[in-house]
Image (spheres, rainbow, N blue to C red):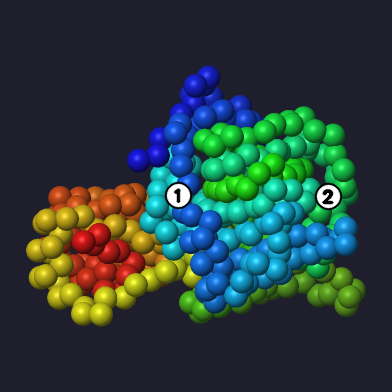
Amino acid sequence: MLTLHLADFSLEHFMACYWQQKPLVIRQGFQDFEDLISPNDLAGLAMEEAVESRVVYKKGGKWQAETGPFESFKRFGKTDWSLVVQAVNHYSPEVAELVKPFAFIPKWRLDDVMISYATPGGGVGPHIDLYDVFICQGSGRRRWRVGDKGNHKQFAAHAALLHTEPFEAIIDVELLPGDILYIPPGFPHDGVTLEESMSYSVGFRAKSGCDMLSGLADYVIDKELGKTLLADPKRPIAHQQGRIDVSDLTLIRANLQSLLDNDQLMADFAGSYFSTTKCALDLQALDEPLETADLVEMLQEQPLIRTGGLRCFYVDTTLAQGVCYVDGERYAFGADLVPSVISLCDQDELSAEMLEPALNNPEFASKLTEWVNAGYWYFAE
């Protein structure tokens, strides 16, 4: 089991002084760290249609990027290129273990675990991310330069690569296996591999207001909500046909604000929106579906394991109703099953004890069986 090692300060100190504030090098954050996936297996994933991947390299001094799936990597040579694969935690249980040491940040903020394999001289160029990232060095060595937050000019080095102009480094460090570099949003950085290496990036993305408003609009349309019309009885006579006055604007804002002030609506939207995965899940549906009684019996002997990348949450506003949100869908199991709902969402492994008395509830037991048969949770053996 991977354990995050902070030699010089506590997690509380990190969250108070570094999280979303300034970058930090954590030497030997993972002691005795070994690669969680081999370069060959990573390359194998990049050959799959469902997996998001790309190769970044230079040709004739100009940056190039190609997206997968790939058939071979021989043509890229032995130096100066990087393979980047997204959401590897969805496909590898070993890589999914890397998420657990960062459980001090809630999973609704988690994006995915991206892995980069790079040959000597390889990198993706100087850039700025809009999310928090913990870059964990695997095998090999990689040099990282991080600049200060500021008004950095960005440009398209390639249609698929947004780079930033040269910056003065406030961190210039060589990462060794087990070292971690934390970078908040907005800080320019550039990593160049010194030798064949693997790098694991645990990303935490914050949605923008624009993204969330778009998601909310889609949600209320899908659920046929927000249909209250603007109402202005006893309206005074208008003398300026082209004017939207202050009272009009107040009326418009109040109509929209009524959606945001609806606690039930916002809880259901947030739960559904943030539990929807960005990348496809690697669901392994059972060839021979289990019956509920068989599942309950098996659960007495071994735990259920959540498949990598599956997102399931509860929201304080609706928890008292036993509501949870799994992969974008809302499920209500009733007040009596609140402890089981909490376990379902909080725990990566579920035992029979954790799910009592929910296993005796026909609705919950049936839904759990459906999820297991679809591959959302699985038995290791």
Image position of 176 with respect to 138: above or below: above
The N terminus is located in which quarter?
top left
Residue 221 visible to the viewer: yes
Secondary structure category for the residue under label 1: loop
Residue 255 image-quadrant placement: bottom right
Residue underneath mark 1: 36
Image position of 178 with respect to 313: above or below: above
Residue underneath mark 2: 164
Q: Residue at x 48, y 46 (%)?
A: 35
The percent coordinates of residue 130 (x first, y second) are 69, 51
Residue 363 visible to the viewer: no
Q: Residue at x 87, y 43 (%)?
A: 166
The percent coordinates of residue 180 (x first, y second) are 57, 36
User: Which amino acid lies under the numbered mark 2 shown in the image of this protein?
Assistant: Thr
Left or right of 160, for residue 115: left
Left or right of 280, for residue 133: right
Residue 286 image-quadrant placement: bottom left
Secondary structure category for the residue under label 2: strand
Which sits in the foreground, 121 or 78? Answer: 78
The percent coordinates of residue 364 (x first, y second) are 21, 66
